[in-house]
Amino acid sequence: MKSKPCAASLTVKTAFVLPPDTNSYGTLFGGKLMAHIDEIAAIAATRHAQRHVVTASTDSVDFLHPVKDGDTICLEAFVTWTHQTSMEVFVKAITENVVNQTRTVCATAYMTMVALDENHKPTTVPGVYPESEEEKYLHQDAAQRAEQRRERRKRSKEVARKFGSAFP
């Protein structure tokens, strides 16, 4: 499988923030932003793998700035690193007041997506390589982030076993 540049998976999405998307403070619900993040990450990963994908992990979503009713939310995503069947996708969300043209990064996240074959089983993905300085910056620590995800998943499984599925 031939490796692809990070930029080949670049995906951009812009949407208006409307009253049903906001909380009682007139700012975008965090869960709504997380849904945008998951969707754009899936599109970028699908573009890279040329396969259907599922979300395997969401690293911390850092909410950096509120997104107000009437603003737009612009998300950019691309694959920063790959393993055998998984892809790390970086997502940056920008809030924009289109009237006065102010733009602010409002959130960043790393998502891990897994490519699936026709039988819904994990399947191999092409490698990825960075070209720009920003891509190189994200790519250089990707293996370390993947290891941290593996450790966090292991701890999550331990917690799930300890607490089980029974209702208290």
Image (tube, rainbow, N blue to C red):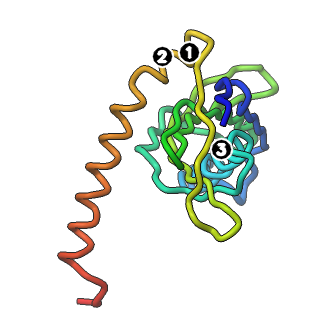
Q: Label for residue 45?
A: 3
Residue 88 in view (yes/no):
yes
Most distant residue in the bottom direction? 167
- Which type of secondary structure does the marked residue at label 2 adopt? helix
> Which residue is at 48% across, 33% downward?
64
- Do residues under tags 2 and 1 come within 8 Å of each other at their CB atoms? yes
The disc labelled 1 sits on which kind of residue? Glu
> Which residue is at 66% across, 61% downward?
117
In the image, is 15 to the left or to the right of 139? Answer: right
The location of residue 144, given as percent across then percent down, is: 33, 32
The location of residue 72, given as percent across then percent down, is: 74, 37
Q: Nearer the viewer, mark 1 or mark 3?
A: 3
Disc 1: CA contacts within 10 A as few (<14), some (14-19) or many (>=20): few
- Which type of secondary structure does the marked residue at label 3 adopt? helix
Label 2, on which residue? 137
Label 1, on which residue? 134
In the image, is 125 to the left or to the right of 52? Answer: left
